Amino acid sequence: MAIEIDGKSYETDEEGYLADITQWVPGVADVMSKEDDLELTEEHWDIINFLREYYEEYQIAPAVRVLTKAVSKRLGKEKGNSKYLYGLFPYGPGKQACRYAGLPKPTGCV
Amino acid sequence: MATKEFTIPEIQEYIEVPDAPIPDATAHLSPFIAKPMHQEALGFPVEVSDDWKEQTLDAMGDLLGKYRGLRVFMDICVKCGACTDKCHYYIGTADPKNMPVARQDLLRRVYRRYFTFAGKFWGALGMPGFVGAADLKRDMLDEMYSYYHQCSECRRCSVFCPYGIDTAEITMAAREILARVGIGQKYDNEIIAKVYTIGNNLGLPERALEDTLEGLEEDLEDETGVAVKLPLNVKGADILLITPSADFFAEPHVDGLMGYAKVFHEAGVSWTLSSSASEAANFGMFIGSYENMRKISLRIREAALELGVKRIIFGECGHAWRVAYSFLNTLAGPFDFLDQNYPIPQHILEFTLGEIEKGTLNIDKSLNDDMVLTFHDSCNVARASRMGDKPGGQFTIPRAVIKAVCNNYVDMDPDTIYEKTFCCGGGGGLLTDDLLELRIKGGLPRMTALQTVTQEYGVTHMAAICAICKSQFTKILPYYGFDMDQIVSVHQLVSSALILTGQVDEDDDTESGEEAA
């Protein structure tokens, strides 16, 4: 499978995750969210960018609590919870947001 | 991502067995097949070769020779039908091949054809069906792959089988045979490969684990004013905690992990986590592979030896506890280097109940008064292990702990708890999005029982002691009209009611009571 951005093809796996994280461009998130009928706002991008920064440092997506804490610090305490994140990414911040950010899917009992 | 449309089952007043089976209702469900790299990491062939038939029969013969039980289970079924309406996947999907006997027969017909006299005889005459046997065809492997991934190895049907046929053993054997022919399951095998390379199911590297634990210590100190630690790789600690990596990562799991840390802190014991064995789960069991199960288990032994601990305690993880309680000594023993005065291994609930009974924990049950609790028995704990020193401890100990920290507790329908508990719908290596339809439908019986206690007793939350159950319910509760956070960890409840020595309320401005114990 693949998605198309500006005439260039980006390979994805059978679950829709980008095959090669280094290929990621912001258009990946745009195309993927459009397929999900989700409009990306600045708030979405804030999460996506944080995921990418964290991944770059730790080679894994952040734990839910790490993510909510970061959101809480950046955007205020009332947003530092998973309800807020699920509000933005209904399929789950861990999976949907990671996919938009080009990160591999978190595996295991999660 | 396109997913096939399906209808969410409606919760009825009682758990209803389908009026009539719907043939092939879920024949389309088949999880993604393992990639070559994941097959290779586990020692399986990367693809199906031309001699798949010989390989299948060789693998089957090998397992039949090793496991007497498997041969007995293949031979002994009398088709009495007692199991037919006991499976959550049959109740949820109405697909007749999800009746445990029918699912077993997918393998049994091959067994009969090639491993029994009657099957060989009638098979040679071209009439294998006369004795319930069938010639092995390539598409039968695909069918097996599909339906043996519609069994969560929960063993509820086995409770009702008059011969005690262990359906999970048959599913495990079938999955092992398929993996040996080159048809492994992606979700399970990718995860096992991560355990080998990184140390846990998540693929959480040591540095990320360190960072995550530090963050949790900060949170605990912010909330309580007490420096509760989550130590990592501490040599000479007394207790090694082995917990599912989901405890580091997901909610409500992490609330449970913080609960363990608070209990250890108050008990005044020295404990540690290990980065090389930062995973309790053992998916080797799910795929039926003794070799992989053993290899995964040995990490725990190595970590215990390396750190020089005296005790091993397991966190809230269902199948890990089965492997730990029932198989660990065989797989990775002897544990003669541990302190023999404690259970080897011990469950965190046994430890916590012990502390509660000793009176070391200052519990204020009213702190959980905003909830009315019920408890979901996880299948592997309920039907494949025990806890404590009395029969049935695996049922009574979790409830005793919950009741010690909560004022409001009720059990669900007796036919859905204890040894008759229903699987959450995502156990046995099926907790993957490509099986979401199955997971939702398989959750129906549990959701029905939960709905009943919600309506009759005002239950607000369901507690569990398995990482898979917790993730599965977080995912499926909303499909049935509940909230995702109605599933909680048992140690989350302990944590909420536990007042630490020297604890300061988060919103408390006074500085008194800062002196930690």
Image (cartoon, coloured by chain):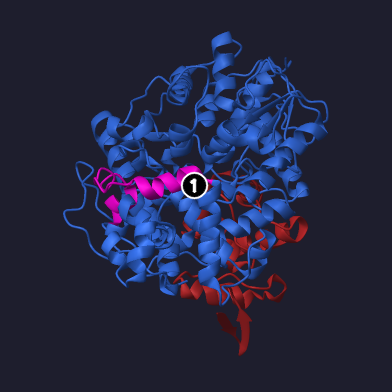
Three-letter residue code for mark 1: Ser
- Of residues A106 and B319, the one nearer the viewer is B319
Which SS class for mark 1? Answer: helix
Check disc 1: other Cα within 10 Å, few if <14, some if 14-19, many if 20+: many
Provide the chain ID for the residue under circle 1: B
The extreme left residue here reads B19
> Can residue A14 be seen in the rendering of this structure?
no
The residue that appears at 53% across and 69% down in the rendered structure is B54
Measured as percent of width and height from the top left, residue B272 is found at 74, 31
Q: Quadrant of the N terminus of chain A?
A: bottom right
Measured as percent of width and height from the top left, residue B517 is found at 72, 14
Q: Is residue B70 magenta?
A: yes
The image quadrant of residue B164 is top left
Chain shown blue: that is B
Name the side, left or right, on which B320 lies relative to B488: right
The extreme bottom residue here reads A7
Measured as percent of width and height from the top left, residue A9 is found at 62, 85
Number of callouts: 1
- Of residues B163 and B252, the one nearer the viewer is B163
The residue that appears at 52% across and 45% down in the rendered structure is B67
Write down the region rendered in magenta: B67-93
> Can residue B289 be seen in the rendering of this structure?
yes
The extreme top residue here reads B358
- Residue matched to label 1: B471
**Image: B1 above or below B155:** below
Name the side, left or right, on which B43 lies relative to B98: right
Q: Is residue B428 magenta?
A: no
Measured as percent of width and height from the top left, residue B147 is found at 39, 60
Chain shown red: that is A
**Image: A17 above or below B335:** below
